[in-house]
Image: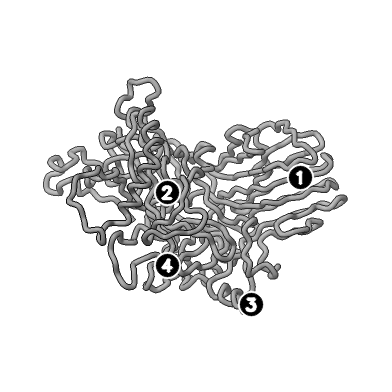
Amino acid sequence: MSRTVTRPEPKTNVSPKPVAATSKESWRDTVEQIVVAFILAILIRAFDAEAFVIPTGSMAPTLMGHHKEVACPQCGFVYTVNAAEEPEGVRRKPPLRVDSSVCVNCRWTATGLAEQPSFKGDRILVSKFPFELPFLPGARPPERWDVVVFRYPEEPETNYIKRLVGLPGELLRIHYGDILTRAAEAEPFTIRRKPTAHQRAMQMNVNDDRHRPTALAQRPEWTRWKGEKGFSETSPGTFQAEEKADSELRYRHLIPDPDQWSELAAGQTPAKSPKASLITDFYSYNTGILAGSPRNWDSSWRQPHWVGDLTTSFDLKFDDPKGIVEVELIEGGVSNRCTIDLSDGIVSLSHGNATLGEPIDLDLKAGQTSRIEFANVDNRLTLWVNGSLPFGEGRTYDDEGKERPAPTAEDLSPVRIRVRGGMRAAVSGLAVSRDIYYTQVPGEVDYNGLWEGREPRNASDLIDILSDQTHFAWLGTLEPRDYKIGPDRFMMMGDNSPRSKDGRQWGTRDQLEEDQTNGWDPSIRESWEVPRSLLIGKAFFIYWPHGKPFGPEIRVGSDWRVPFRPYFERMTLIR
């Protein structure tokens, strides 16, 4: 799927149209432009900036293209789904509208979405002076993980927006969804870690226990968080660790397939029992199906790549600071732990049998609720407590040169919370998220040729494969893919990696085959490279995502609802 960036079209003088043919989309655009004009004027005056519109979904979830926003009818979780394939201004019967999608939180297939509004892409600001005027104070060269607008090398008249992942002179490697680089052949490859602000912005939901499906309310066998050894669920989503007991709470990735959901929704017990499976790169944004199209499992469920880089968060409340709280994330059978000793306030991070650096002091108050967030991402353990970073960016561990671990049976319950030392404590607001997985080729599965003769035919087959640890060894045999980047060149990739038309699959139409020096680009670039001369600027702010409808619904056309308010929650700096 291509990702272009378009400037808002300037207003032009046109002949008046009859009232009956007046475009409701034009009314909507005019109203929205009036609402944001004041904000935009201030921001453009403060920066050497230019406004752009995001039309497609290759940078989701960081930036949204044309999309729908869906509140899952089963669990209430709000997610977005790509609607870039919907033609604008075309009246057809049946209409070419996104009509169904799959919830990332509970995997319920929501239907009847054609009548819901589709929103245009994010309007963003791009600062040009850091790249165009590098001699000015505050300017800097392009850095890894910047979101950059640039001219598409094959068609320099077209603007693209991607994330910068590769720098000049590097050999870049994509392996198991991670980005690794080295500067010289004699050096080992090094994993490239995202700054924590970028890491959090790029996280994708796996499960939010605060949004439980209504059809599973009386189905404890489908409950993903299970208390053991003293943990009991005192109310939905709140688990109590009893005093004088060592308690443990485990997450199991239990997702009903479409057939099981049909039976559950009908009040029946599914013929197939629940199976905990590996966490994959499933993303609701890529599950939209147009009305009238067959519901093809490939386009909705075939997102099979195992993701071991996880983050968990929860609320912790305890009565007496006398015990130990331990949070554990499993990746490839290896334990990554955050241990909080409440009796003396000492906190440590460990990977396997090794403690990472020196412990620190942390003062958690008895009787108060603290939000704990623990991440194992890019070979780094990071802890947030009430939004702060007591370990700074975190503690890293070095697995370079070691064989990539395949998942084990332990990865079927990859998140665990323990309370030890006879402490009475409550855990609630549980959530699990994952890191972005960079595929080696957009639109293709990294595992092609590695299925061991068990290539899945449907969603049920996929869950069977990802829940059977006897077949996990093949996941450790994936070969890497390397890209050499020349001097003064960069490599760009989309955050929505499986659906991003980026450097991994570009061509070199800018170079004439018979005489490459006479093409658009006489420097003979590799297909994945973006020359520095094509960089426009750094995207830094979403100034208008879309209007957020509220109150009584009044329809003005298919995609406009009033009243609406500014979507303040998504007006933010771009990480």
- Residue at (42, 72) in percent of width and height: 295
Question: How far apart are labels 1 and 2 at the CA level?
Answer: 37 Å
Which of the labelled discs sits on residue 260, or is there none? none
- Residue at (60, 32) in percent of width and height: 392
Which mark is in front, 1 or 2? 2
Q: Which residue is mark 1?
A: 317
Q: State whether residue 284 is above or below residue 574.
A: below
Q: Three-letter amino acid code at disc 3?
A: Gly
**Drawn side of residue 227 relative to residue 375, left or right:** right
Which label's residue is closer to the chain start, 2 or 3? 3
Give the structural element (helix, strand or loop) at label 2.
Answer: loop
Q: Which residue is mark 4?
A: 99
Which label's residue is closer to the chain start, 3 or 4? 4
Do the CB atoms of the residues marked 3 and 1 lie less than 8 Å apart? Answer: no
Mark 4 neighbour class, 10 Å CA radius: few under 14, some 14 to 19, many 20 or more: many
Question: How far apart are labels 4 and 1 at the CA level?
Answer: 43 Å
Q: Three-letter amino acid code at disc 2?
A: His
Which of the labelled discs sits on residue 546, or is there none? 2
Which mark is in front, 2 or 4? 2
Give the structural element (helix, strand or loop) at label 1.
Answer: strand
Q: Position of residue 151 (x, y in %)?
A: 27, 41
Q: Quadrant of residue 286?
A: bottom left
Q: Position of residue 29 (x, y in %)?
A: 34, 49
Residue 477 visible to an observer of this rendering: no
Closer to the camera, 19 or 145? 19
Q: Which residue is mark 3?
A: 267
Q: Quadrant of residue 210?
A: bottom right
Residue 181 visible to an observer of this rendering: yes
Question: How far apart are labels 2 and 4 at the CA level?
Answer: 20 Å
Which label's residue is closer to the chain start, 1 or 2? 1
Q: Quadrant of residue 108?
A: bottom right
Which label's residue is closer to the chain start, 4 or 1? 4
